[in-house]
Image (tube, grey):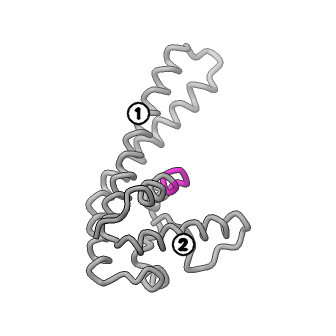
Amino acid sequence: MRMPVKPFICLVLSLILLGWPGTVAAQGFKWWQSDQFKQDLGLTSEQVSRLEEIFQALQPTLKTQKETLDKFEGKLSKVVSDPNADEALVLQTVEKTEAARAELTKSRTLLTFRMGRILTSDQNVKLKALHEQWVRERRKGSTPPHRESPRR
């Protein structure tokens, strides 16, 4: 079930840039469990099970990393808004915040990569199209109920 590298890279980059898997729904939408996505993609029960296993394996890490990022972003906000803040402290806090963001991004990318390997080439192409459709509809302000969010 190997897929061409270029389409997969495009999918991963678009999903990361748009925040999908978001923290994997901060993590509310498990697309692989949606009846509509299962039908649209032609997912087998084995694929659904494997996608869920991948998600469950990385979920604790993603949750912890998201909490860490939120904590550092809160600290950064306070430091930046403090008129007496030292520039060195601001830089140190920015570095910690961005390191936390990078770790979360790596985990999200790994999740997306592992999930992409479960799908066939055709399914990956369809998933990308569904995601693009969701983005277009979201921009218009009319997201269909079965396409609530490509975040889990």
Please state the extent of the stretch shown in magenta in the rendering. 14-19
Q: Residues within 10 Å of mark 1 (few under 14, many from 20)?
A: some
Quarter of the N terminus within the rendering: bottom left
User: Can you give x and y, in whole percent of width and height, for residue 100 in the image?
Assistant: 41, 37
User: Can you give x and y, in whole percent of width and height, for residue 39 in the image?
Assistant: 45, 86
Query: Which marked residue is nearer to the observer: mark 2 or mark 1?
Result: 2
As for residue 140 lying within the magenta part, the answer is no
Mark carried by residue 99 = 1
Which residue is pictured at 47% across the width and 59% down the height? 11
Q: Amino acid at mark 1?
A: Ala
User: Can you give x and y, in whole percent of width and height, for residue 132 in the image?
Assistant: 58, 66
Disc 1 element: helix
Q: Is residue 141 above or below residue 44?
A: above
Which residue is pictured at 46% across the width and 33% down the height? 97
Q: Amino acid at mark 2?
A: Leu
Dominant SS type (magenta): helix
Q: Are marks 2 and 1 in contact (CB under 8 Å)?
A: no
Which residue is pictured at 49% across the width and 57% down the height? 15
